[in-house]
Amino acid sequence: MLEHQDDSDTALFHLIQLSDRSAFNELYKRHVQALFRYANGILNDRDATNDVLQEVFIWFWNNRNQIRPSSIKSYLFVGVKFKIANYIRDGKLRDSVYTKVKDVGMGDLFYDHDELEVKELRAFIYGFIETLPDKCRYVFQLSRVEGLSHKEIAEKLNISEKTVENQISIALKKLRQKMTKNPLLSILC
């Protein structure tokens, strides 16, 4: 199916607004790999990444007549950022997004134009960590920065695993609250 291969994103979008599924499929094929690398580079979870992409593309199709993107590619990336923020805010991640954020900028997971935003997110998270109470901060850093399990942290600090879970839950709740209030992240939330 090569009928739309040479069409610009703008031309594809006009056809999508006319409910042309083959144009939508071409747009999807054109951008899904880059969006996947971007989202999975942050989420580090293939299932969550696929969920994010599915939600973004379903929303894009369902709202095709209401949206007016100036750049389709940018619009899709912002949609993915929004959905990633929802995953973080809603606590749906199985793996730590915070551990992955510290590695951003290495390899080819992100486009150059996104590196600044990711560095800002990383700076925001590390700045947030510094505001936590001492015990909570130390537990959170051991978990999210050093990658220790709850059991390893409990043994290292001679506290119960439940205490570790509680401290991490407190930190994540505060982080989600702070993310929704921060103007820097308002585009994500």
Image (spheres, rainbow, N blue to C red):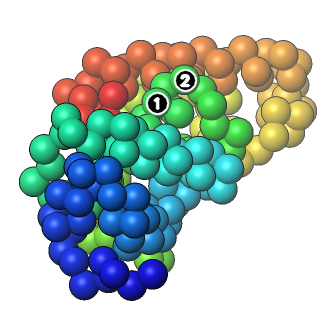
**Quadrant where the image shows the N terminus:** bottom left
**Quadrant where the image shows the C terminus:** top left
Q: Reply above or below: 184 against 136.
A: below
Q: Residue furthest left?
A: 70
Q: Reply above or below: 119 against 96.
A: below
Element class at badge 1: helix
Who's the residue at 55% across and 58% down the image?
Answer: 40
Mark pair 1, 2: CA separation: 6 Å
Who's the residue at 68% across and 44% down the image?
Answer: 95
Dividing the picture into quadrants, the one containing residue 164 is top right
Q: Is residue 104 left or right of residue 188?
A: right
Q: Which residue is mark 2?
A: 90
Most foreground residue, 20 or 61: 20
- Labelled disc at residue 178: none
Most foreground residue, 116 or 155: 116
Element class at badge 2: loop
Answer few, some or many: residues within 10 Å of disc 2's Cα (few below 14, many 20 plus, some between 14 and 19): few
Amino acid under label 2?
Answer: Asp
Most foreground residue, 138 or 97: 97
Instruction: State the image coordinates of residue 35 (x, y, percent, origin top left).
Output: 43, 61
Who's the residue at 81% across and 40% down the image?
Answer: 149
Q: Which residue is mark 1?
A: 86
Instruction: State the image coordinates of residue 151 (x, y, percent, origin top left).
Output: 88, 34
Tell whether label 2 touches label 1 (CB within 8 Å).
yes
Answer few, some or many: residues within 10 Å of disc 1's Cα (few below 14, many 20 plus, some between 14 and 19): some
Instruction: State the image coordinates of residue 123 (x, y, percent, origin top left).
Output: 34, 44
Instruction: State the image coordinates of residue 142 (x, y, percent, origin top left).
Output: 68, 40
Who's the residue at 54% across and 23% down the image?
Answer: 90
Q: In this view of the protein, can residue 72 be seen by the observer?
A: no
Amino acid under label 1?
Answer: Asn
Q: Is residue 35 left or right of residue 181?
A: right
Q: In this view of the protein, can residue 60 be seen by the observer?
A: yes
